[in-house]
Amino acid sequence: MIVQDLGLFVLAIAVGLALDWKKWRKWSHFGFACALYAVALAIWAYHTMSGAALHPVSELHQLLDRFLPIGDQSILGEDY
Amino acid sequence: MTKLSSRQVVLIGALFAFTDATMSVQAQLASFARQHLCMVYFITFAVLLIPLWMLARVSKRFPRQDLFQALAERHPVMGRTVVALYILYFLWVAARDVRLTGEFFNITLLARTPVGVIAAVNILAAVTLVRPTGINVLARSSELYGTALFLIIPLVFIALFKDLDFSYMLPLTDVDWVGVLEGAWVITAYFGDMIGIAFLVSGGAFRFRDGMLALALASFGLMVISMLALLSLSVPVMSAMTFPLYEMVRQIRITDFLDRFELPVLAVWATTIVCKIGYSLYLISLGFKRIIPGLPGQRVVFPAALLIYSCSFWFFENAVDMINMNLTMPLAELVFQFLLPAVLFFALWPKREGGGENRG
């Protein structure tokens, strides 16, 4: 399953690179696009392979939750 | 430089605010503001006029540039840092929209289709809108589907009118102001995404009047829909549901012929959320283009879309976490929706003619 997920993502990157092939005027711009692809792939690989240990926005929520008076008990509704 | 018409700007702004504010946040609104749900929208409308006014003033000072461009040229280092921060913000907005839509369709309609596949289809649709011509196709799609979405609202009102129970609004005078303010806190973060139109519209074409109209359209439309849900479902039921507006639309039966009225509604809504993902994708690409001079924005669309896709799964642990986050994330979003527009308002103040030479 992990190999399949990663393989599909790499395939998407290959399609993206093929779409713009020969259109780049500067190598640095092409390098920037490749860097973006690399970051996206690294994040995807981390998500699929690590069992998702760290979720930055969820962690931020945990951090901010301590400082806010609004509780999250209301997501399940209230007893009337 | 693409010029957008006033109508397009209004519809883009309204869709920016409206589309994902129809999701699970409505249940939280009902649990906070209860029968005074409509008050939340008045507060949100009034509060958000401030950043919209500031950004409209800033936009007016640069008649031949967009805001990212103005920032990068006026303050090369700090300006680019602010642009990078806004790229992160719109990346977060897009990732949230992609994941939220994926989870929503997975729960309601496509239970056997993986969230990843639904998210991939959404993001691919957004890429198809943005990549060929930038904002042009997006603006025209918004005109078509935004109009259709806002026309559905009176239709829902007519179809549901016989099922409304106005006793759910009682007691009318017993206002829980703290609850109303908590509701406004939650929904302002969603509506605040609308500040994106100031960055989207280039060449000083963003006028405060358009922003105000967009905000009014979104606020009024959502207020009507929320009140319909409240009057047809009641506060306890609405606040216990994950997607109360969807459940409300499911109640509608227009003869046997249209007993699944929610399907055409969802079809239009899904297209508008793709448009919203497209706005964020366009803004991310535009931001990169302004940070790196000469970079063709069109060719950054696909890598940026893949980044959004991977971040939409990495950022959020699960669907419940995304609902909980509605309460805390406004704190982080207010930085981008109120603080940074204020910083831009003062940092991009018009230069004095003649500079320091006239002082002596």
Image (spheres, coloured by chain):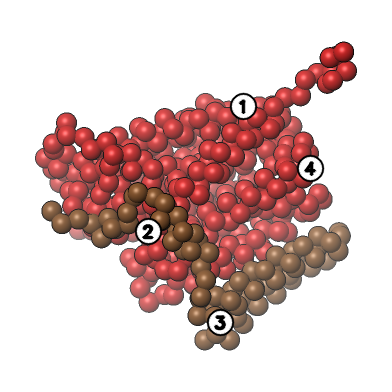
Q: Mark 4 near mark 3, Cβ–Cβ under 8 Å?
A: no
Tag 4: amino acid: Pro
Q: Nearer the viewer, residue B359 or B44?
A: B359
Tag 2: amino acid: Asn
Q: Residue at x 57, y 29 (%)?
A: B54
Q: Residue at x 23, y 57 (%)?
A: A77
Instruction: Please name the residue that numbered disc 2 is placed on.
Output: B324
The answer to whether one can see residue B143 in this image is no
User: Judging from the image, what is the letter of the chain drawn in brown?
Assistant: A
Work out how far the residue at label 2 is from the one at label 1, CA to CA, in angstroms: 35 Å
Quarter of the rendering occupied by the N terminus of chain B: top right
**Place of residue B76 in the rendered image (x, y in percent of width and height, measured from the top left):** 78, 42
Q: Nearer the viewer, residue B341 or B357?
A: B357
Instruction: Please name the residue that numbered disc 3 is placed on.
Output: A49
Q: Mark 4 near mark 2, Cβ–Cβ under 8 Å?
A: no
Instruction: Please name the residue that numbered disc 1 is placed on.
Output: B57
Q: Mark 4 near mark 1, Cβ–Cβ under 8 Å?
A: no
User: Judging from the image, what is the letter of the chain drawn in red?
Assistant: B
